[in-house]
Image (cartoon, rainbow, N blue to C red):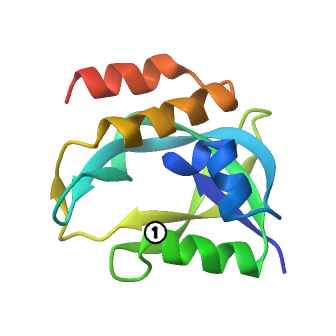
Amino acid sequence: MKKLYIAYGSNLNIEQMSWRCPTATIWGKGILKDWTLIFRSMRGPAYATIKKDAGSNVPVVVWEIDRRSEFSLDRYEGYPSFYHKEDIEVTMDNGEAITGMAYIMNQQAVPGIPSKSYVRTIMEGYLDNNLNLGYLECFLSAQ
């Protein structure tokens, strides 16, 4: 069974996803309306997550994944102890509203600074998918 997975962080990176989830395919691009990107940590470097924030938007890529890919993502994301899953709405580039699954970091995580290599992976994902790199750069400069 296939499902739609919403990527906003390192899983935007096509090369990374090709070895982690070789059967996953890009379904489309869109925006999470009224969400913002943040970096949080349990201990050690910080990782991307999202939180509700009226008026903010996060560019995303929606992947179509199978059960094997979801299992691989569960392990990578530390589900369920580090991230949990939520079904959230995405406004696709064509204006269509769809619902997909996203990993969102658990509440006990605190704000933090991501590693340079992690940020580079996300930036490559923005470039891979022709997303607005200015969004990420603006966000990171405000950190």
Tell me where residue 15 appears, x and y as whole percent: 68, 45
Residue for badge 1: 77
Tell me where residue 42 appears, x and y as whole percent: 19, 66
- Position of the N terminus, as image quadrant, is bottom right
Q: Image quadrant of residue 60? A: top right
Q: Is residue 108 left or right of residue 116?
A: left
Up-down relation of residue 117 to residue 3 (above or below): above
Q: Is residue 54 left or right of residue 16?
A: left
Q: Image quadrant of residue 102? A: bottom right
**Hey, what amino acid is under mark 1?**
Glu
Up-down relation of residue 16 to residue 82 (above or below): above
**Residue 98 at least partly seen:** no
Point 73% across, 79% down: residue: 68
Tell me where residue 74 appears, x and y as whole percent: 53, 76
Point 69% across, 44% down: residue: 14
Point 30% across, 71% down: residue: 106
Q: Is residue 60 left or right of residue 128?
A: left
Tell me where residue 128 appears, x and y as whole percent: 68, 31
Point 24% across, 54% down: residue: 40
Count of marks placed on residues: 1
**Residue 133 at least partly seen:** yes
Disc 1 on helix, strand or loop? Answer: helix
- Give 37 or 128, whichever is nearer the viewer: 128
- Position of the C terminus, as image quadrant, is top left
- Give 52 or 11, whichever is nearer the viewer: 11
Mark 1, other Cα within 10 Å: few <14 / some 14–19 / many ≥20: some
- Give 8 or 127, whichever is nearer the viewer: 127
